[in-house]
Amino acid sequence: MRPTTIVLQCACALIGLLFVLVGLGAKGNAFVGGLVFGSMMFLFASILGADYSTNADAKSRRIFKALALLFACPVLAIGIFYLYETLSAAQWVDASTVAIRLLVYALAVVGIVFDHHPVVRRAVQRLGFSASKR
């Protein structure tokens, strides 16, 4: 990996750690927000390592893909909880937008983790992005 990619990964990880620590010290919505933003920053750092254009080593890309899947789980869990809350409050418009966001987020994470699959590769190429050759 290039040194600039490693520096960017470290910066994302440090910002994520800061968000998590602030979230752990807070109460209420700040607690949830800190954990969500922290896990998203760790997810961004993992995505940098999982991308074939920034990381040529296939073995380390697999590790970063597993980390991306791991750090996507808290955001999905909190999103599903929020979807449940909006459905129980009969806020159908909010629930539908949350469901669409969760679906897009989940599909993006699945696309990152399974980027070698032919169906995912074709979908990425149709969207105009470059896909890995392997």
Image (cartoon, rainbow, N blue to C red):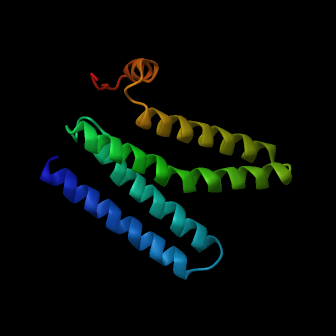
76 left or right, relative to 21: right
Give the image location of residue 90, x and y in percent. Answer: 86, 49
**Residue closest to the far front:** 59
**Residue closest to the far bottom:** 25
Q: Out of 110 and 16, give the one closest to the viewer.
A: 110
Query: How many numbered marks does the figure carry?
Result: 0
Of the 4 image quadrants, the one containing the C terminus is top left
Q: Relative to 6, does residue 32 appear above or below in the rendering?
A: below
Give the image location of residue 127, x and y in percent. Answer: 41, 23
Q: Residue at x 30, y 41 (%)?
A: 61
Q: Relative to 83, does residue 113 appear above or below in the rendering?
A: above
51 left or right, relative to 124: left
Q: Relative to 26, does residue 61 appear above or below in the rendering?
A: above
30 left or right, relative to 71: right
Q: Residue at x 14, y 48 (%)?
A: 2
Q: Out of 95 and 6, give the one closest to the viewer.
A: 6
Q: Relative to 119, does residue 65 appear above or below in the rendering?
A: below
Quadrant of the rendered structure where residue 126 is? top left
Give the image location of residue 123, x and y in percent. Answer: 44, 21
Q: Residue at x 40, y 73 (%)?
A: 18
Q: Residue at x 61, y 43 (%)?
A: 102
Give the image location of residue 57, x and y in percent. Answer: 21, 39
131 left or right, relative to 53: right
